[in-house]
Image: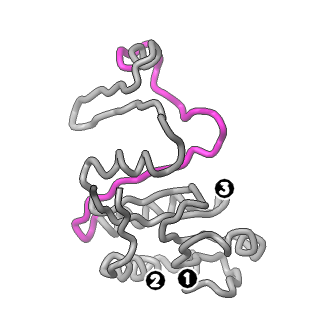
Amino acid sequence: MDTVRVLQVAGFKNSGKTTLIRTLIAEAESQGLRTATVKHHGHGDPPALPDSETDSMKFFGDGAAVSAVSGGGIIQLHLREAETGPLPMLRLAAAVRPDLVLVEGFKQAPFEKIVLLRSAEDWEQLKDLPDIRLAVTAGTDAPGAPEIIAREDTEAIRGWFGRWLKGGTGHVHL
């Protein structure tokens, strides 16, 4: 069984999750770490797929459980979910042997997490999520949060992330 570091970023729509993850990817890369990302597409419908006339999409459309295409150093993979939730995607991401997996969404998943807050109401709705390590706020109070950093303080966020990376927490057995 593989072990990989996992950090989750949770918050409501337009709270800055993608922007924060992009900052964390850049910081991890600056430290020579290989990062994988897993994103929850919470819109109800499937994510947008490539043109249905491509060969790989024809195979997928015909019922292939997995369809992959490779070229120019990139692999594009389409896989039908046998089970839902973040764990199957984490297993797949771990197969490429990253140093770190960053998860966007899946609020209730049991991973160490950063929560992004736009308002005090966000904190009231998110404060009971499992394993919150940091609250990134837009000037919002977050009573009971283990640590709070203002959204615009990118250097403090990068510093926190660097300390988290050096710590012994956040390992998940897949």
Q: Earlier in the sequence, mark 2 or mark 3?
A: 3
User: Under tag 3, what secondary structure?
Assistant: loop
Cβ–Cβ under 8 Å for marks 2 and 1? yes
**Mark 1 and 3 residues: CB-CB less than 8 Å, in contact?**
no
Q: Which residue is mark 2?
A: 156
Going by the numbered disc 2, the residue's amino acid type is: Ala
Residue 111 placed where, x, y %? 48, 66
N-term mark: 2 or 1: 1
Position of residue 35 measured from the top left corner of the image (x, y, whole percent): 32, 58
Q: CA distance from mark 2 to mark 3?
A: 23 Å
Q: Residue at x 69, y 87 (%)?
A: 143
**Badge 3 local density, few (<14 within 10 Å), some, or many (20+)?**
few
Q: First in sequence, mark 1 or 3: give its number.
A: 3
The amino acid type of the residue labelled 1 equals: Ile
For the residue marked with disc 3, what is the amino acid? Lys
* Residue 149, numbered label: 1
Tell me if 109 is positioned left or right of 14 in this view. Answer: left
Residue 84 drawn above or below residue 33 = above
* Other-residue count near label 2 (Cα within 10 Å), few / some / many at <14 / 14–19 / ≥20: some
Looking at the rendering, the stretch of residues picked out in magenta corresponds to: 29-56
Q: Nearer the viewer, residue 73 or 143?
A: 143
Which residue corresponds to the image point at 46% horizontal and 20% vertical from the top-left?
A: 51
The residue that label 3 is drawn on is: 13
Q: Quadrant of the C terminus?
A: bottom left
